[in-house]
């Protein structure tokens, strides 16, 4: 069975590609290298001993996407390719709307009616939720960022597409905060330039690439004043995409449009995460408290009972596991 993985050289995409290959799927990776490196492709092949196909194209280019669908006969698609920085989206909203929505529309225009489709969404679609943990039944509120708004729009497009095409089967995954690296230490989060996410900034500070980590605000209404997030190990996140794909292939879905939260169900504050990283890796982090960052929600952690009940999926790794693997990955990068 041939699966297209868009953004397959990125952080989540590369780990999911490894999982797919190890499960015996025939994988075609599409990436434009805007936020990834080509050598990740070699690492994927080395980890798995398999040879996936790679197409370097921009999904905003209609002609290139049409050619892609002429050249291959996909049974399923896992769609990661998107710009993903909340902070950047606040400053460059038009970039996010053009890329994130345009890429999805170009894919859908070329899809035959029968298709298994997994969409990479985000907990940002909930905005600042009224209660915790966040369940899938909570109303979708105004997003705190253009990035979150693009995910809301894409979910709406997919819901309508499913209604018009009964043989198109979609699962949308609203995941929380992925961290960690592959157990091999060969692939992990690899931001180009200044990291936007907490853990790579943390590991780069610990190893000396960055002088100091900035914590954005300590005056929120939380136990220690810093934002709270649900941190999920990247290998768990990769696994859930494959589990959901298999769930669709086995025709276990009750509807052709389903959506699920993906997280651990537990919230940790920024300071709690920093302290835990120091403890499990026996290092000290130089950090200071800075101003709040525009676009950040205060608290977000998931209720994951729905995906456990329907798909039978749950996390296997701990936050400690993720933080240990992140540090190993950072040290391996230094030695490359």
Image: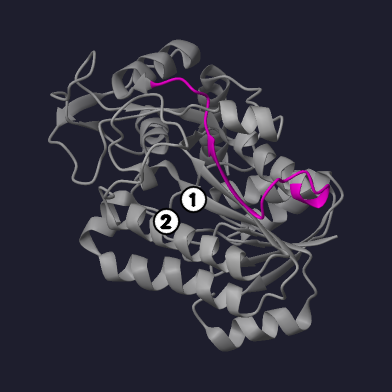
- Of residues 94 and 282, the one nearer the viewer is 94
Residue at x 40%, y 56% (from the top left corner): 152
* Image quarter of the N terminus: bottom right
- Crowding at mark 1 (Cα within 10 Å: few <14, some 14-19, many 20+): many
Magenta stretch contains residue 30:
no
Tell me the SS state at disc 2: helix
Quote the CA–CA distance across marks 2 and 1.
6 Å
- Give the residue number, with chain letter if any, for mark 2: 151
Whole-percent x, y for residue 56 in the image: 62, 73
* Image quarter of the C terminus: top right
- Of residues 304 and 214, the one nearer the viewer is 304
Q: Earlier in the sequence, mark 2 or mark 1?
A: 1
For the residues bearing labels 2 and 1, Cβ distance under 8 angstroms = yes
Q: Which residues are magenta?
A: 248-267
Q: Is residue 57 visible?
A: no
- Of residues 274 and 220, the one nearer the viewer is 220
Residue at x 67%, y 47% (from the top left corner): 16
- Give the residue number, with chain letter if any, for mark 1: 121
Residue at x 50%, y 34% (from the top left corner): 179
Whole-percent x, y for residue 113 in the image: 72, 72
Residue 54 is left or right of residue 25, and the answer is left
Up-down relation of residue 142 to residue 167 (above or below): above
Residue 295: mark? none
Residue 228 is left or right of residue 10, and the answer is left
Color theme of the render: one colour
Q: Quadrant of residue 328?
A: top right
Residue at x 31%, y 24% (from the top left corner): 270
């Amino acid at each position: 069975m041939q699966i297209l993985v868009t953004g397959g050289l990125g952080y989540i995409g590369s780990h999911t590609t490894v999982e797919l290959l190890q499960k015996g799927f025939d994988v075609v990776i599409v990436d434009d290298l805007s936020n990834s490196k080509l050598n990740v492709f070699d690492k994927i092949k080395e980890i798995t001993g398999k040879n996936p196909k790679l197409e370097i194209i921009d999904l905003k280019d209609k002609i290139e996407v049409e050619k892609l669908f002429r050249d291959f006969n996909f049974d399923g698609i896992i769609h990661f390719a998107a710009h993903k920085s909340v902070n950047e989206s606040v400053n460059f909203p038009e970039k996010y709307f053009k890329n994130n929505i345009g890429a999805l529309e170009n894919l859908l225009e070329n899809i035959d009616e029968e298709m298994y489709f997994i969409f990479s969404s985000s907990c940002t679609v909930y905005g600042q939720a009224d209660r915790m943990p966040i369940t899938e039944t909570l109303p979708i509120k105004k997003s705190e960022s253009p990035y979150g708004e693009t995910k809301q729009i894409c979910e709406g497009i997919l819901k309508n597409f499913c209604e018009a095409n009964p043989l198109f089967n979609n699962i949308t995954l609203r995941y929380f905060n992925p961290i960690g690296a592959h157990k091999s230490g060969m692939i992990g989060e690899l931001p180009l330039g200044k990291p936007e996410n907490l853990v790579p900034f943390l590991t780069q500070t610990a190893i000396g690439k960055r002088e100091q980590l900035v914590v954005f605000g300590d005056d929120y209404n939380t136990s220690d004043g810093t934002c709270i997030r649900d941190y999920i190990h990247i290998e768990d996140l990769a696994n859930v995409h494959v589990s959901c794909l298999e769930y669709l292939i086995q025709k276990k879905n009750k509807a052709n449009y389903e959506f699920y939260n993906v997280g651990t169900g537990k919230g940790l504050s920024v300071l709690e995460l920093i302290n835990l990283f120091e403890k499990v890796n026996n290092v000290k982090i130089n950090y200071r408290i800075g101003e709040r960052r525009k676009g950040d929600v205060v608290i977000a952690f998931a209720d994951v009972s729905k995906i456990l009940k329907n798909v039978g999926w749950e996390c296997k790794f701990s936050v400690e596991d993720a933080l240990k693997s992140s540090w190993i990955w950072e040290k391996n990068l230094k030695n490359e």
